Amino acid sequence: MGQLRIHYFQHVSFEGLGYIETWCRDKGHSLTSTKWFESGNLPELADIDWLIVMGGPMGVYDNDTYKWLDTEKAFIKQCIDTGKIVIGICLGAQLIASALGAKVYPNKEKEIGWFPVQLTETGKRSHWFNDFPQIFTVLHWHGDTFDLPEGGELLVKTDACLNQAFAYQRNVLALQFHFETTAQSLSNMIHHCGHELVKGDFIQTETALVSGAYHIPVANSLLQTILDKAVLLTKQ
């Protein structure tokens, strides 16, 4: 298999693919998108190999405001059921959990900043993370969490939020945190969501967020490993 047809869901103008776009361009894969804030045009299932579901400030449960959420979740479920590679980030992970029947709700703590995450025992053995360090630092920017869906395997956890990443079957990976962050995407988040940087046990200041950008290259490198593994799964 050569060029992959990768479709992504974007929910707001300032949360794009980040490093994922760089990886796709470098590897020569084709990219198409549904930008829900502009239109709800969906591809034919037969025309895509992967679905990547990005983040956003809305909640999975905000159906009254964002009428397209149910349509989006139904398409995610179709992709899962037909064996597509499906990767969700932050809101995207929550949408996958919801599409699989799990509850999504406010976490006891908001988690915004550069914080370490830890692999579970299952995570250490998983095909996604089996060659990762046990602890690594990534960007978090979320207030909600999700229950683990039936059949899901918890791979990554933190003290502030237990369910940080899960796998479902072999083709689905849900990440509550942001491997894909770039200097530009971090700047965009601070600009558009800086009002969320209030005092909290797991909320960093703007200064700490900016100074933590030295974590970006390692986070992107780890994401590259995951994406490369997903390519191998696609070929199976």
Image (cartoon, grey):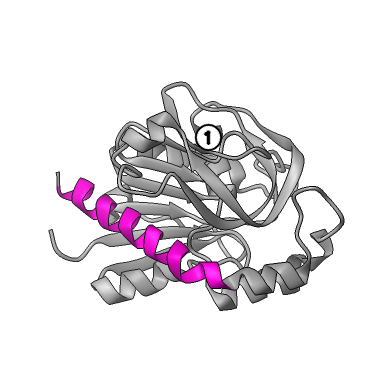
The 10 Å Cα crowd at callout 1, few under 14, some 14 to 19, many 20 or more, is many
Residue 79 visible in the current orientation? no
Q: Residue furthest right?
A: 199
In the image, 223 versus 25, the foreground residue is: 223
Q: Quadrant of the N terminus?
A: bottom left
Tag 1: amino acid: Ala
Q: Secondary structure at mark 1?
A: helix
Which residue is depicted at the point 41% across and 30% down? 121
Q: Residue furthest front?
A: 134
* Residue 116, horizontal then vertical, whole percent: 57, 50
* Residue 4, horizontal then vertical, whole percent: 24, 61
Residue behind mark 1:
97
Does the magenta portion include 221? yes
* Residue 202, horizontal then vertical, whole percent: 74, 49
Vertical comparison of 233 with 81: above or below? below
Vertical comparison of 20 with 130: above or below? below
In the image, 13 versus 46, the foreground residue is: 13
Does the magenta portion include 223? yes
Q: How many marks?
A: 1
Classified by dominant secondary structure, the portion drawn in magenta counts as: helix
* Residue 118, horizontal then vertical, whole percent: 51, 42
Q: In screen coordinates, is 212 left or right of 45?
A: right
In the image, 65 versus 49, the foreground residue is: 49
Which stretch appears magenta?
Answer: 214-235
